Image (cartoon, rainbow, N blue to C red):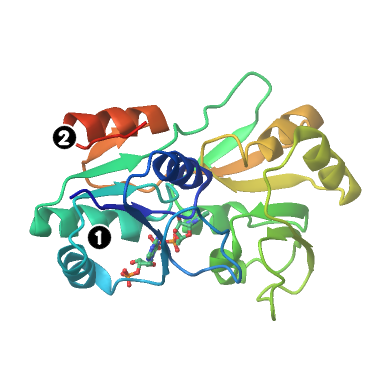
Amino acid sequence: MTHLLILGGTTEANALAKTVAERGIQATYSYAGRVDNPRPQPLPMRVGGFGGVDGLTTYLRDHAITHVIDATHPFAAQMSANAVAACHKADVPLAALTRPAWVEQDGDDWQHVPDIDGAVVALSGAPQRVFLAVGRMHLEEFAPQPQHRYLLRLVDEPGALPLPNCDVVVSRGPFTLADDQALMQRHGIQLVVSKNAGGLGARAKLDAARALGLPVVMIDRPALPQRVELSSVAQVLDWLAHSGVNLGV
Ligand code: NAP
């Protein structure tokens, strides 16, 4: 009997959950539990870490999981590495539902950095107005650059912030070019810091940066172990069908 585990927290995972639910395929959607009110899903949900590779391996066995789809964010490197290791141990097939990285276009002014530390170093220098679009979890790492005025866009209202000069916008997206351009103009943004997340929901800030002629510090993706990578819900369905899953209607 099929039982998919979808590692979620992304637009792609939500789209997959919808399709899987519509087809009546048994599946569980897993959230890390990072946001206060996770978006409801049309599938049974579980929330919170599994307890590393061993915890996930046990979960896969205890819940008779037959397939894992890792649809986490491209920067969720720990979860993705754990999924590869646990699926190997439990002998459960794994595929990642990923989205292509963003690629620089004419008119873009990107400085590539390999990781968050690289972005922190790139912010050395005179005070600027910076749109720091890296998510709540990484703000502390930017504390060594307190001279800037930061614009933060966060999913939940934050508590105390590790940066002294911040403007906070609470919003979940997806975002539009017009809205992001207006937001960046309103805050007099001079520099954007972004993870190379890929996908449509978060790219408006890069289109807005191009339109406004602003430089971007682009944090490249973390390296991940080798795995099957698929880039659409349709490809996931094909992969499931090839491994014998009955896809229903
Ligand atoms: P991470 O650093 O790779 O994961 C750290 C730990 O969090 C994992 O080892 C695991 O704990 C737990 N975890 C992560 N994703 C999980 C999931 N979907 N279900 C259950 N446990 C999970 O992950 P992260 O970068 O903090 O991302 C956490 C979540 O936010 C993911 O679901 C991701 O899709 C979403 N997200 C991340 C970003 C980003 O920029 N990183 C952006 C948007 C959304 P255990 O070891 O205890 O199992």
Check disc 1: other Cα within 10 Å, few if <14, some if 14-19, many if 20+.
Answer: many
Callout 1: CB less than 8 Å from ligand 1: yes
- Within the image, what quadrant is residue 147 found in? bottom right
Residue 164: image x %, image y %? 75, 74
Which residue is the site of mark 2?
Answer: 244
Disc 1, disc 2: CB below 8 Å? no
Extreme residue in the bottom direction = 160
Extreme residue in the front direction = 249
Which residue is the site of mark 1?
Answer: 82
Residue depicted at x 25% and y 70%: 52
Tell me: 42 left or right of 178.
left
Cα distance, mark 1 to mark 2? Answer: 25 Å
Residue 63: image x %, image y %? 21, 65
Can you tell which of label 1 and label 2 is closer to the viewer? 2
Tell me: 17 left or right of 149.
left
| Residue type for callout 2 | Gly
Extreme residue in the right direction = 186
Check disc 2: other Cα within 10 Å, few if <14, some if 14-19, many if 20+.
Answer: few
Tell me, yes or no, if residue 232 can be seen here. no
- Within the image, what quadrant is residue 207 found in? top right
Which secondary structure, mark 1? helix
Q: Toward the viewer: 30 or 19?
A: 19
